[in-house]
Image (cartoon, rainbow, N blue to C red):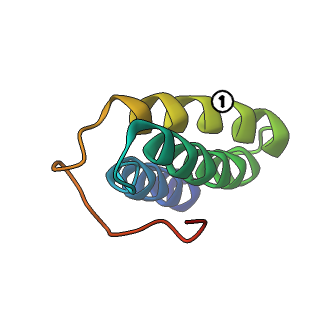
Amino acid sequence: MKRATTLALLLSVAAVGLTGCGHNPGDRAVSGGLLGAGAGAVIGGVTGGNPVTGALIGGAVGAVGGAVTRPDTIDLGRPAWR
């Protein structure tokens, strides 16, 4: 169980670090939401919770995190959907 919790925390940190993808708030909200949903689903599944609930919560948190970041905080270039 300790390994699962550690993995979940590492994935959370990675998702938060990547929420700044894109050049405008909309792009960052979308990329943050997608990354957060993926990380939330993994965390929910690994910790014994519901992956769908984890994806919904992670997606919402990631979208908000992405929308409130500035493009100069983390810039990984142009989003794949543009």
Of 73 and 24, the residue lying toward us:
24
Reply above or below: 61 against 26: above
Badge 1: residue crowd in 10 Å (few <14, some 14–19, many ≥20):
some
Q: Is residue 6 left or right of residue 39?
A: left
Total count of labels: 1
Q: Secondary structure at mark 1?
A: helix
Q: Quadrant of residue 14?
A: bottom left
Q: Residue at x 66, y 55 (%)?
A: 38
Reply above or below: 22 against 16: below
Q: Quadrant of residue 44?
A: top right
Going by the numbered disc 1, the residue's amino acid type is Ile
Q: Is residue 19 left or right of residue 72?
A: right
Reply above or below: 1 against 55: below
Residue 57 position within the rendered picture, expressed as x and y whole percent measured from the top left? 66, 30
Per the image, the residue denoted by label 1 is 57
The residue at the far left in this view is: 72
The residue at the far front in this view is: 82
Of 52 and 45, the residue lying toward us:
52
Reply above or below: 26 against 46: above
Q: Residue at x 45, y 56 (%)?
A: 6
Quarter placement of the C terminus: bottom right
Q: Residue at x 34, y 28 (%)?
A: 68
Residue 16 position within the rendered picture, expressed as x and y whole percent measured from the top left? 38, 47
Q: Residue at x 80, y 45 (%)?
A: 51
